[in-house]
Image (cartoon, rainbow, N blue to C red):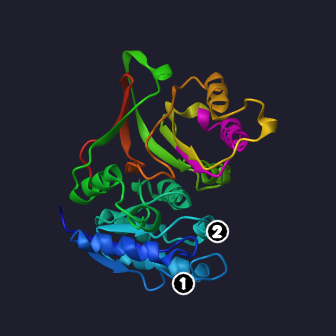
């Protein structure tokens, strides 16, 4: 295991489960990493981790930290209101010097904006509280993928597709990997901070969103011309929603089946990413190969730091 300088900060919602974040910090230190916690990591202003100025300053400190990995305490909400004021040149400089920015959920806003503004790669992956700070042991696959990122060894990920998506012929597409939280991506449509990726591999996930809301967000991206420009659309996990009697059989599969009638690109499911314990790390903005053979799917990006 390669010892890393890890910087932990809070650019979105306030940390409510402080014991979980502290457990996560302790775990990373126990693994031998040098862990630096931002001075405002536990700040609170209404629902946010400090007011806008404080969270912008936290992002600046993460950029200036010289850390190998800068990772968020949690998602929630808060980054979209900061997008016009983030110092993207400072972010790009930090990435060029080797800092890998890691997070998910609300962090999709930061990742999308960084890709749109700078073309730089960030990493969709764990947060400290919900992943490293769980009671009991963190998920083995998440941990292994994070270790791969820390050591610079990660070159791709794979998963098994549902039987219905089996391909009897080897299929592969190449394009820029981008995406993340669907609600955030839909919110960014029509703004300067939704990346203009054509011929990309778009991955999506969400939590607490009923399938009809998922479909509504997808229609927004479809009618905005975004989905039709992709070479593939990959569903991660959509979790923690409740069907209601009014659905009468309408479910997430209904949405996916409908989407397949609207786009020519393959629509795949089962990517181990989202608000779930087992999550891989994905390089947002990197050129990848997406390959499908039988029920095996792979996203490969080669050796990159």
Q: Nearer the viewer, residue 62 or 84?
A: 62
Pinpoint residue 131: horizontal percent, then vertical percent: 42, 61
| Left/right of residue 184 with respect to residue 166 in the rendered view | right
- The single residue placed furthest to the right in the displayed view is 246
Q: Which residue is mark 2?
A: 81
Mark 1 → mark 2, Cα distance in angstroms: 18 Å
Q: How many marks?
A: 2
Pinpoint residue 19: horizontal percent, then vertical percent: 45, 77
In the image, residue 126 above or below residue 293: below
Q: Which residues are magenta?
A: 204-227
The question of residue 276 being in magenta is answered with no
Pinpoint residue 159: horizontal percent, then vertical percent: 37, 35
Nearer the N terminus, badge 1 or badge 2? 1
Q: Nearer the viewer, residue 64 or 7?
A: 7
- The answer to whether mark 1 and mark 2 are in CB contact below 8 A is no
**Which quadrant holds the C terminus?**
bottom left
């Amino acid at each position: 295991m390669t010892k890393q300088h890890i910087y932990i900060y809070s650019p979105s919602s306030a940390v409510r489960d402080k014991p979980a974040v502290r457990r996560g910090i302790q775990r990373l230190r126990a693994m031998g990493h040098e862990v630096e916690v931002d001075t405002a990591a536990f700040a609170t202003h209404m629902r946010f981790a400090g007011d806008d100025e404080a969270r912008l300053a936290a992002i600046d400190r993460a950029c200036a930290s010289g850390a190998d990995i800068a990772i968020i305490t949690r998602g929630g909400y808060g980054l979209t209101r900061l997008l016009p004021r983030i110092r993207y040149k400072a972010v790009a400089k930090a990435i060029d010097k080797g800092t890998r920015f890691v997070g998910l959920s609300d962090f999709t806003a930061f990742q999308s904006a960084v890709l749109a503004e700078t073309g730089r790669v960030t990493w969709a992956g764990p947060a400290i509280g919900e992943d490293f700070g769980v009671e009991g042991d963190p998920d083995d696959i998440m941990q292994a993928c994070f270790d791969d990122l820390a050591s610079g060894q990660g070159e791709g990920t794979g998963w098994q597709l549902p039987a219905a998506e089996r391909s009897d012929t080897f299929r592969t597409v190449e394009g820029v990997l981008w995406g993340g939280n669907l609600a955030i991506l839909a919110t960014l449509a029509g703004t300067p901070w939704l990346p203009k990726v054509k011929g990309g591999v778009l991955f999506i996930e969400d939590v607490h969103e009923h399938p009809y809301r998922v479909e509504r967000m997808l229609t927004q991206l479809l009618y905005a011309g975004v989905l039709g420009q992709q070479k593939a659309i990959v569903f991660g996990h959509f979790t923690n929603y409740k069907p209601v009697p009014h659905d009468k059989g309408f479910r997430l599969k209904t949405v996916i089946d409908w989407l397949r009638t609207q786009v020519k690109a393959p629509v795949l499911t089962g990517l181990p990413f989202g608000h779930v314990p087992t999550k891989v790390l994905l390089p947002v903005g990197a050129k990848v190969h997406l390959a499908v053979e039988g029920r095996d799917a792979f996203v490969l990006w080669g050796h990159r730091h």
